Amino acid sequence: MCVCVYIYIHIYICICLCVYIYTHIYMHMFVCIYIFHNYVTFSRRIRNSWTVEYNLLKLGGIHVQSTI
């Protein structure tokens, strides 16, 4: 009887530990994906703003050259 209870408790602890490890890894993956997604979005936004500014400067330069 005592050995069976010990085995059941051991199995229960192992299952709980496996579930905890799985959810912990899943949470870390989610956080890493979230941070990576924000980084990509932020860098793309900066790159797009630089491109827009460069195009505006280029258009302004062409406009100035054409008026001279």
Image (tube, rainbow, N blue to C red):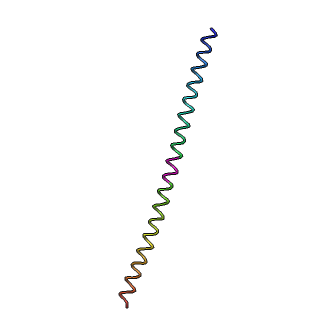
Image point 51% across, 44% down: which residue?
Answer: 30
Instruction: Please identify the residue farthest to the bottom as the structure is shown.
Output: 68
> Which quadrant holds the C terminus?
bottom left
Residue drawn 38% across and 84% down? 63
Q: Going by the picture, which residue comes out furthest to the left?
A: 66
Q: Relative to 1, is 33 on the left or the right?
A: left
Residue 64: name its quadrant. bottom left
Residue 18 falls left or right of residue 58: right
Question: Secondary structure of the magenta portion, mostly?
Answer: helix
Q: Position of residue 67 (x, y in %)?
A: 37, 89
Which quadrant of the view contains residue 66? bottom left
Q: Is residue 34 magenta?
A: yes
Quarter occupied by residue 11: top right
Q: Is residue 61 magenta?
A: no
Where residue 50 appears, x then y in whole percent?
Answer: 45, 69
Q: Position of residue 4 (x, y in %)?
A: 59, 11
| Left or right: 38 in relation to 58 | right
Total number of numbered discs in the rendering = 0
In this view, 15 is above or below 47: above
Residue 1 at x, y percent in the picture: 62, 8
What residue is shown at x 58% (from left), y 22% (from top)?
Answer: 12
Q: Residue at x 51, y 55 (%)?
A: 38
**Magenta-drawn segment:** 32-37
> Residue placed farthest to the right in the image?
2
